[in-house]
Image (spheres, rainbow, N blue to C red):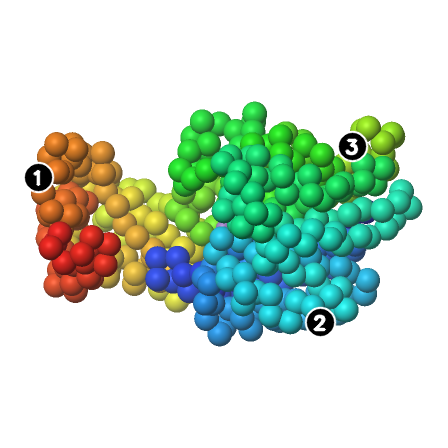
Amino acid sequence: MKFIHLSDLHIGKNVNDHSMIGEQKYILNQILEGIKKEKPDAVLISGDVYDKTTPPLEAVLLLDDFLNKLDEIEGLTVILISGNHDSAERLSFGAKRMKKSGLYIKSIFDGDLTPVTLEDEYGKVNFYSVPFIRRADVNNVYNTDIRDYTEAFSFVVEKMELDTSERNVILSHQLVTGASFSESETAVGGIEDIKAEAYAAFDYAALGHIHKPQNIGSRLRYCGTPLKYNVSEVGYQKTYTVVELYGKKSEQELCNINVREVPLIPEHDMVKIEGYFDEIMRARTDENGIVTSDYVYVVLRDDDYVNDAAVKLRKLYPNFMNASYSGKGQTTAFDFDMTIEKAEKQTPFNIFSEFYKKMHMENDPDEVQTEILKAAIKEVWGEDEI
Ligand SMILES: [Mn+2]
């Protein structure tokens, strides 16, 4: 049994006000070509299909096009769950009808844990779909009062009544922590996590949620995003994951598996360039007068603030994203000295303005920013807190 594991497509995402739709179209085509070559039995998409609960039209059209092209591939089963970025209800549109053409969408957690079962020469493989769930979703559906996230998820797995004589795969969009997790990664998002042990009964767990590809043990895997969506990801190679399941030696053992990554080459890469402003502006340009059309984050070593740096950089680097300073005279978020005692004496607006000034060369937020900030504070704390 061979399947391709994808997740966190985030179709319709903007990064630093740049629409990623063209990049996403390009990379989905590349994935499609890969699928045609690999000839898997199934494609699994483990959540965060869209970036927003109300995706823009172009995002809906792109996903529709991708799913239609997958549908044209003979004998291919597609299984898709929703992530925390998706609207479960919107994504479930037409789900019942689509089953007929081999597209299984599970985006609403309703306690129905019927797997999609495929068969190969070694027997059956059951694919269980659990869309992104919170502890409260489990308690609501089963009328329970489970206080622990791992316990809640384990409860769901118990309800599946897994047949261990067959092979079992799960699609899940959660923050899973396990032995192989480094400390910094455990802290992702600061939200509750599910311990890897909750997934121990599965021959493979196709995880989504964390954007950096990684294994937790040998059978739990985050395949990562197909594109770099954040400056922190500039150093990563994006891939899709190909998994092959073989037979089981005995009922007590999990099956043999083979997991490999296939590199994805984006149309435009996302890179970080560090140097002095003048140096970066002197870089060699091509026949169109630009240095590169990659998505560029610039780290300026200059001690002094460069006026209109963004405007100037954008001429040579049309996909310029953002600039920050690493020079001596510059401040970073770490220089923001705000203790609880100090904060208690100030209004949220003052605290934010001070932070903004630290991050923007002592410039105050402008009129529009001030207006947005005040509106946000009013919404969170009420009028009198401004
Ligand atoms: Mn995501």
How far apart marks 3 and 1 lie (CA) works out to: 59 Å
Q: Return the residue found at the far left.
A: 345
> Residue under circle 3?
254
How far apart marks 2 and 1 lie (CA) works out to: 59 Å
Q: Earlier in the sequence, mark 2 or mark 1?
A: 2
Residue found at x 75% / y 59%: 77
Residue found at x 56% / y 43%: 144
Question: On the rendered structure, is 198 left or right of 301?
Answer: right
> Residue under circle 1?
345
> Residue under circle 2?
97
Q: Earlier in the sequence, mark 3 or mark 1?
A: 3
Mark 2 residue element: helix
Identify which amino acid the numbered label 3 is placed on. Leu
Residue found at x 77% / y 47%: 126
Q: Is mark 2 within 8 Å of ligand 1?
A: no
In the rendered image, residue 180, in percent from the top left (x then y), is placed at 56, 27
Q: Earlier in the sequence, mark 3 or mark 2?
A: 2
Task: Report the disc number at residue 145.
Answer: none
Identify which amino acid the numbered label 2 is placed on. Arg
Residue 172 seen: yes
How far apart marks 3 and 2 lie (CA) works out to: 33 Å
In the rendered image, residue 167, in percent from the top left (x then y), is placed at 80, 41
Displayed quadrant of residue 71:
bottom right
In the rendered image, residue 345, in percent from the top left (x then y), is placed at 8, 39
Mark 1 residue element: loop
Residue 308 seen: no
